[in-house]
Image (cartoon, grey):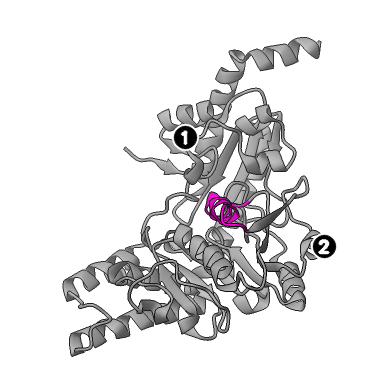
Amino acid sequence: MSIINLDQISSKSLLPEVKEAMIAAIKQDYHNPSSQHRSGEQAAEVLERAREAVAQLINCAISKEVVFTSGGTESVNHAIKGVALANAEKGKHIITSNIEHNAVIRSLRRLKSSGFNVTSLSVDPSGRVNPQDVADAITDETILVSIMHSNNETGTIQPIEEIGRITRAKKVIFHTDAVDSVGVVPMDVQALGVDLLSFASNTFYGPTGVGGLYIRRGIRVFPLLDGGIQENNKRAGSENLIGIIGMGKAAELARQNMASWLTHVKRLKEKLLTELPNYIDEYILNTHPEHSLPNMVSMSIKYIEGESVMLMLDDDDIAVSTRSACATGSLRASHVLLSMGLSHADAQGTLVISFGIDNSEDDILAFLNSLKTVVTTLRDISPLYSKQNASSH
């Protein structure tokens, strides 16, 4: 059975070269990189080569500023809690936005229970934070601003460079959750002006369960895990060497192929957006028309539930999502879409379509044909749609 995967924001296949690199590493049977003998030193060299490849992907000048983690969630937790604990004597005020990933929201919730104060900024109807709101929210007590680079449900990209200029001027530490951006669009920590940046390997066709946190030199961050002195004393615990080798290879390939990958997914997105009105009507595009990821579209289809659409598309061997995989199972409407001003009913009718380098224009057309049938079927039995039609006559 061949599945058309249009849920690539939550799951991408490993690139063949990444698989080969990881299998070769398993056969090599590397020792612990922290061991002092020759075998350990060989493993440490391989680890550092992977770190250098990842550092180059985000234009990090000093590779030791990259700390390997178990994934995006740990990277976010490490950044937010680590900065808060290390800088609490300066103040206990943190600024974020209303549309952040749960890793940010729940990290901040934990800190609030320990006496920290959090200001959560609204977004405009297009899903973007106003940088001036960040500037206005900063006080003498502010120690951290955490605003995501791109939203994991809509794909909308935030004005990170503008916010970075504000935080630098105010001497406030700035973290961005760039898990869905690194390896998808060009990323430059120098140009962005961020002090910490969270990312994950699986976003750019590397293994799941491996991530990284960029920590600019001189930024005080307490380790999230207590133990050994691995990762330059930033993260305790033996490194996942096989996964990190895969991540290093994936980073190298992403940097080499970024231009061609971008061209491909932009073409698919343009195809989807151009053809969509020919197949269904009465929908809302939640993805910013200009400032957004090239591999993702969020749409809310009126009068029906997105989950029903998703399940029926799954019967046609087409995988899409209704929201972030991390929020799957929640019956509540997306906090992101509600923050953008959508009604609960429209938010519940949302589909998130995300694609990758292994998708084709034929996949897009197959999706649209199936979507047309599914939407027609569901609206025929939707009391909301019947009511709307009756009121319009």
**Residue bearing the label numbered 1:** 329
Q: Is residue 353 left or right of residue 239?
A: right
**Amino acid on which disc 1 is placed:** Gly
Assign the magenta stretch its main secondary structure. helix
**Amino acid on which disc 2 is placed:** Asp
Q: Compare residues 255 and 157 and report the one nearer the observer.
A: 157
Taking the spot 42% from the left edge, 50% from the top edge, the residue there is 11
Residue 6 seen by the camera: no
* Residue 67, x across and y down, in percent: 44, 74
Is residue 106 inside the magenta stretch? yes
Residue count near mark 2 (Cα–Cα under 10 Å), binned few <14, some 14–19, many ≥20: few
121 vs 175: above or below: above
* Residue 85, x across and y down, in percent: 54, 68
* Element at label 2: helix
Answer with mark 1 or mark 2, whichever residue precedes in sequence: 2
Do the numbered discs 1 and 2 sit on residues whose CB atoms are within 8 Å?
Answer: no
Residue 191 seen by the camera: yes
Quadrant where the C terminus lies?
Answer: top right
Q: What's the magenta region? A: 100-115
Taking the spot 60% from the left edge, 14% from the top edge, the residue there is 380
Q: In which quarter of the image is residue 93?
A: bottom right
Is residue 367 inside the magenta stretch? no
* Element at label 1: loop
Q: How far is mark 1 from mark 2, CA to CA?
A: 36 Å
**Residue bearing the label numbered 2:** 136
Q: In which quarter of the image is residue 138?
A: bottom right
Quadrant where the N terminus lies?
Answer: top left
